Amino acid sequence: MPVLFLFFWVTLNGRITVEIVVLGVFISIMMSLFTYRILGISPKNELTVWKNYFTFFIPYVAVLVVSIIKANFLMIRLILSPQGNVSPQIIYFNSPVKTGFSRILLTYSIMLTPGTFIFELEEGCFGVHAIQKDMTVDIDKTNIVQKLQKIEEKIDA
Protein backbone atom coordinates (compact mmCIF):
# COMPACT_ATOMS: atom_id res chain seq x y z
CA MET A 1 0.00 0.00 0.00
CA PRO A 2 2.82 2.49 0.64
CA VAL A 3 3.88 2.14 -2.99
CA LEU A 4 0.37 3.02 -4.17
CA PHE A 5 0.24 6.03 -1.87
CA LEU A 6 3.64 7.17 -3.15
CA PHE A 7 2.55 6.75 -6.77
CA PHE A 8 -0.62 8.74 -6.03
CA TRP A 9 1.43 11.47 -4.30
CA VAL A 10 3.85 11.84 -7.22
CA THR A 11 0.97 11.81 -9.71
CA LEU A 12 -0.82 14.61 -7.87
CA ASN A 13 2.38 16.70 -7.77
CA GLY A 14 2.95 16.31 -11.49
CA ARG A 15 6.73 16.32 -11.25
CA ILE A 16 9.48 14.34 -9.56
CA THR A 17 12.04 16.08 -7.39
CA VAL A 18 14.05 14.86 -4.41
CA GLU A 19 11.89 16.87 -2.00
CA ILE A 20 8.64 15.50 -3.43
CA VAL A 21 9.88 11.91 -3.29
CA VAL A 22 11.26 12.19 0.27
CA LEU A 23 8.11 13.87 1.54
CA GLY A 24 6.03 11.37 -0.42
CA VAL A 25 7.81 8.39 1.15
CA PHE A 26 7.18 9.80 4.64
CA ILE A 27 3.53 10.57 3.92
CA SER A 28 3.01 7.18 2.26
CA ILE A 29 4.38 5.31 5.26
CA MET A 30 2.25 7.35 7.66
CA MET A 31 -0.89 6.87 5.53
CA SER A 32 -0.23 3.13 5.32
CA LEU A 33 0.16 2.81 9.09
CA PHE A 34 -3.03 4.83 9.58
CA THR A 35 -4.87 2.66 7.05
CA TYR A 36 -3.64 -0.58 8.63
CA ARG A 37 -4.84 0.59 12.03
CA ILE A 38 -8.24 1.87 10.86
CA LEU A 39 -9.02 -1.17 8.66
CA GLY A 40 -7.55 -3.63 11.13
CA ILE A 41 -5.29 -5.32 8.62
CA SER A 42 -1.60 -6.04 8.72
CA PRO A 43 1.10 -5.80 6.06
CA LYS A 44 1.08 -9.62 5.96
CA ASN A 45 -2.65 -9.64 5.09
CA GLU A 46 -2.01 -7.02 2.44
CA LEU A 47 0.71 -9.16 0.87
CA THR A 48 -1.74 -12.07 0.73
CA VAL A 49 -4.26 -9.89 -1.08
CA TRP A 50 -1.63 -8.72 -3.60
CA LYS A 51 -0.45 -12.31 -4.12
CA ASN A 52 -4.00 -13.43 -4.87
CA TYR A 53 -4.47 -10.43 -7.13
CA PHE A 54 -1.44 -11.29 -9.27
CA THR A 55 -2.12 -15.02 -9.15
CA PHE A 56 -5.79 -14.90 -10.15
CA PHE A 57 -6.96 -11.52 -11.40
CA ILE A 58 -4.20 -10.67 -13.90
CA PRO A 59 -4.49 -14.02 -15.77
CA TYR A 60 -8.30 -13.68 -15.77
CA VAL A 61 -8.08 -10.20 -17.28
CA ALA A 62 -5.64 -11.49 -19.91
CA VAL A 63 -8.08 -14.25 -20.93
CA LEU A 64 -10.92 -11.72 -20.99
CA VAL A 65 -8.99 -9.28 -23.20
CA VAL A 66 -8.12 -12.07 -25.67
CA SER A 67 -11.80 -13.10 -25.79
CA ILE A 68 -12.91 -9.52 -26.39
CA ILE A 69 -10.37 -9.09 -29.21
CA LYS A 70 -11.51 -12.34 -30.86
CA ALA A 71 -15.15 -11.27 -30.59
CA ASN A 72 -14.32 -7.88 -32.08
CA PHE A 73 -12.72 -9.50 -35.13
CA LEU A 74 -15.71 -11.82 -35.46
CA MET A 75 -18.05 -8.80 -35.38
CA ILE A 76 -15.92 -6.94 -37.95
CA ARG A 77 -16.01 -9.97 -40.24
CA LEU A 78 -19.77 -10.25 -39.74
CA ILE A 79 -20.37 -6.56 -40.49
CA LEU A 80 -18.13 -6.48 -43.57
CA SER A 81 -19.45 -9.77 -44.94
CA PRO A 82 -21.59 -9.26 -48.05
CA GLN A 83 -23.84 -12.19 -47.06
CA GLY A 84 -24.55 -10.81 -43.58
CA ASN A 85 -24.64 -14.15 -41.80
CA VAL A 86 -26.59 -12.82 -38.86
CA SER A 87 -28.38 -15.58 -37.00
CA PRO A 88 -29.49 -14.22 -33.62
CA GLN A 89 -29.72 -16.78 -30.87
CA ILE A 90 -31.17 -16.74 -27.37
CA ILE A 91 -30.00 -19.35 -24.91
CA TYR A 92 -30.38 -20.08 -21.24
CA PHE A 93 -27.71 -21.87 -19.25
CA ASN A 94 -27.07 -22.62 -15.62
CA SER A 95 -24.04 -20.92 -14.17
CA PRO A 96 -21.07 -23.25 -13.78
CA VAL A 97 -19.60 -20.85 -11.20
CA LYS A 98 -21.04 -20.89 -7.70
CA THR A 99 -20.06 -17.74 -5.80
CA GLY A 100 -21.84 -14.44 -6.25
CA PHE A 101 -18.64 -12.58 -7.07
CA SER A 102 -17.73 -15.08 -9.81
CA ARG A 103 -21.23 -14.77 -11.27
CA ILE A 104 -20.86 -10.99 -11.38
CA LEU A 105 -17.50 -11.33 -13.13
CA LEU A 106 -19.01 -13.79 -15.61
CA THR A 107 -21.94 -11.45 -16.24
CA TYR A 108 -19.67 -8.49 -16.94
CA SER A 109 -17.38 -10.64 -19.07
CA ILE A 110 -20.27 -11.70 -21.28
CA MET A 111 -21.60 -8.14 -21.46
CA LEU A 112 -18.17 -6.76 -22.43
CA THR A 113 -17.80 -9.25 -25.26
CA PRO A 114 -19.16 -7.73 -28.49
CA GLY A 115 -22.17 -9.50 -29.95
CA THR A 116 -23.46 -10.90 -26.66
CA PHE A 117 -25.86 -9.48 -24.12
CA ILE A 118 -27.32 -10.85 -20.89
CA PHE A 119 -30.99 -10.03 -20.58
CA GLU A 120 -31.80 -12.22 -17.58
CA LEU A 121 -29.96 -13.52 -14.55
CA GLU A 122 -31.85 -15.32 -11.86
CA GLU A 123 -30.72 -17.92 -9.34
CA GLY A 124 -27.61 -18.72 -11.36
CA CYS A 125 -29.46 -19.10 -14.67
CA PHE A 126 -28.21 -16.79 -17.39
CA GLY A 127 -30.29 -15.66 -20.36
CA VAL A 128 -27.94 -14.63 -23.18
CA HIS A 129 -28.70 -13.07 -26.55
CA ALA A 130 -26.01 -13.44 -29.19
CA ILE A 131 -25.96 -11.90 -32.64
CA GLN A 132 -24.63 -15.11 -34.17
CA LYS A 133 -25.36 -18.73 -33.29
CA ASP A 134 -21.63 -19.61 -33.12
CA MET A 135 -21.22 -17.28 -30.14
CA THR A 136 -23.50 -19.39 -27.95
CA VAL A 137 -21.92 -22.78 -28.61
CA ASP A 138 -20.57 -24.14 -25.29
CA ILE A 139 -20.80 -20.71 -23.68
CA ASP A 140 -20.70 -22.39 -20.27
CA LYS A 141 -17.34 -24.02 -21.11
CA THR A 142 -15.39 -21.00 -22.37
CA ASN A 143 -11.90 -20.02 -21.18
CA ILE A 144 -13.40 -17.31 -18.99
CA VAL A 145 -15.66 -19.79 -17.18
CA GLN A 146 -12.79 -22.24 -16.73
CA LYS A 147 -10.58 -19.48 -15.30
CA LEU A 148 -13.34 -18.44 -12.87
CA GLN A 149 -13.81 -22.05 -11.77
CA LYS A 150 -10.07 -22.38 -11.11
CA ILE A 151 -10.17 -19.19 -9.05
CA GLU A 152 -13.05 -20.58 -6.99
CA GLU A 153 -11.22 -23.87 -6.45
CA LYS A 154 -7.99 -22.18 -5.33
CA ILE A 155 -9.70 -19.73 -2.99
CA ASP A 156 -11.90 -22.42 -1.40
CA ALA A 157 -8.90 -24.72 -0.85
Image (cartoon, grey):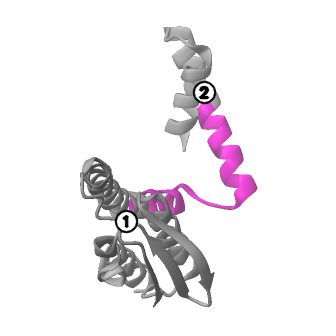
Q: Label 1 near label 2: C-beta < 8 Å?
A: no
Q: Position of residue 73 (x, y in %)?
A: 26, 51
Q: Position of residue 69 (x, y in %)?
A: 30, 51
Asked if residue 14 is positioned above or below residue 90 in the image, the reply reads: above
Location of residue 133 (image quadrant): bottom left
Classify residue 8 as left or right of residue 31: left
Q: In terms of sequence position, does the residue under pointer 2 or pointer 1 come before the other?
A: 2
**Residue positioned 66% across, 53% down in the render:** 36
Position of the N terminus by quadrant: top right
Asked if residue 133 is positioned above or below residue 110 in the image, the reply reads: below
- Residue topped by disc 1: 56
Part of the protein shown in magenta:
28-51
Q: Main secondary structure of the magenta part?
A: helix
* Residue 77 or residue 113, whichever sits in front: 77
Position of the C terminus by quadrant: bottom left
Q: Nearer the viewer, mark 2 or mark 1?
A: 1
What's under tag 1, amino acid-wise? Phe
Q: What is the secondary structure assignment of the residue under circle 2?
A: helix
What's under tag 2, amino acid-wise? Phe
Location of residue 121 (image quadrant): bottom right
**Residue positioned 60% across, 25% down in the render:** 9
**Residue positioned 60% across, 19% down in the render:** 23
- Residue topped by disc 2: 26
Q: Residues within 10 Å of mark 2 (few under 14, many from 20)?
A: some
Magenta stretch holds residue 43: yes
